[in-house]
Image (cartoon, rainbow, N blue to C red):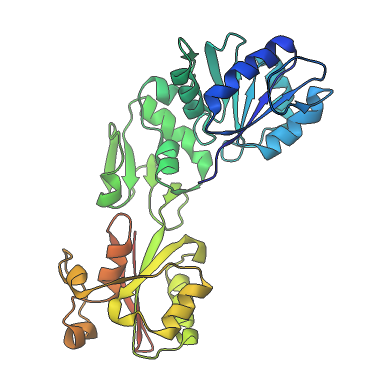
Amino acid sequence: MSKLKIAIVTINQPSLTSACNLVPYLHDYDVDVFGKKDLEHNLDNLNLYNKLDDIMQPAWDGYDAIIAILAMGAVVRKIAPFLKDKATDPAVIVINLALDKVVPLLSGHLGGANELSDIIASRIDNCVNFVSTATDQTNTLAFEMFAKKSNLEIHNLKELALISNSLLNKKEVEVLTYESIFETIPNKKNIKLVSEQTSELCVNITPFDSPLLTFKPKVFLGMGCNRDTSFEDIEKAFLSFLDTNKLKVEQIENIASFEAKADENGLLEFAKKYNFDINFYNEKEINTLEGEFSKSASTKFFGLKGVAEPSSVLVSKYKELIIPKEVYDKKITIAAAV
């Protein structure tokens, strides 16, 4: 994973001096300091500018986080023209000259401002992180943070405010998902697992589209095929499977199969084209997997519980079969898990 890119913006000698003192605490990040010329510093490199307006756009577009050591009002005015939405805006943090008060000003959750501020406050003696986000202050579940940490793709983010405010007001929120995913949610206060939506206060955590606030986990495919099945036939079946189940190629994280398929050229060519790091499982791994699977020809020929379904579960993150195997041209099977 690449290092977080941070721009530290200063405006005068006192703020530049503070930046020089701050940089060592950010040794594990990719940090650039911006300041005016003819000021004293001990940095290997100082990025010079004439006016704040000259650097705010490049800092906004080119960095994951901006740490401003200047008046908060000035920061608000300078970033205002660039504000877009919480899903794409960078983290913006304001810190005082003494480096003992840090304020995550913008993109506290998805942008990472709260987390970075926590790290700074933990590294500097007597530094206080002033977090204004209500869910953090009340220890209330923040679905967007759960999604970020779980690598879930976020959709319909505009619905987040209603859900977050409902939880803050101690209203029950439904979660439409699988039990295995629900169990990973760290704070289940006022949330309820459901198999179908019965309330407008509902969050969807599945790979499928929904008008609800939706967090999509990656999908893992198990694939089986007859001997010498061509790449073209496998690709055709794959694309048909995605179309039938309304999934996109980008949602597929990886694929898997039985070890006897490890020399199938068509399957290997398919994995290479779509950049899948295909996993192959042996008889013991498949047959010791808990759960019942659809009857398969692999039982007759290899003594297996199956190929597509158990392979998809074995390679998946949450070990949850979501689409039973589908058969194409009587020679290719595909199943999906999360």
Say left or right for 137 vs 16. Answer: left
Q: Residue at x 62, y 10 (%)?
A: 97
Say left or right for 127 vs 286. Answer: right
Please, which residue is most extreme toward the bottom here?
Answer: 228
Percent across and percent down for residue 39 are 78, 15
Q: Residue at x 51, y 71 (%)?
A: 274
Asked if 237 appears above or below 293 in the picture, the reply is below
Q: Can residue 198 be seen from the camera position used here?
A: no
Say left or right for 321 vs 302. Answer: right
Q: Can residue 206 be seen from the camera position used here?
A: yes
Percent across and percent down for residue 29 are 55, 33
Asked if 174 appears above or below 249 in the picture, the reply is above
Asked if 186 appears above or below 331 in the picture, the reply is above
Q: Residue at x 36, y 32 (%)?
A: 141
Say left or right for 61 vs 241. Answer: right
Q: Nearer the viewer, residue 94 or 10?
A: 10
Percent across and percent down for residue 247 are 46, 65
Percent across and percent down for residue 152 are 43, 48
Count of marks, rendered view: 0
The image quadrant that residue 45 belongs to is top right
* Image quadrant containing the C terminus: bottom left
Q: Nearer the viewer, residue 51 or 187?
A: 51
Please, which residue is most extreme toward the right here?
Answer: 50
Q: Residue at x 73, y 11 (%)?
A: 13
Q: Nearer the viewer, residue 212 or 326?
A: 326
The image quadrant that residue 311 belongs to is bottom left
The image quadrant that residue 208 belongs to is bottom left
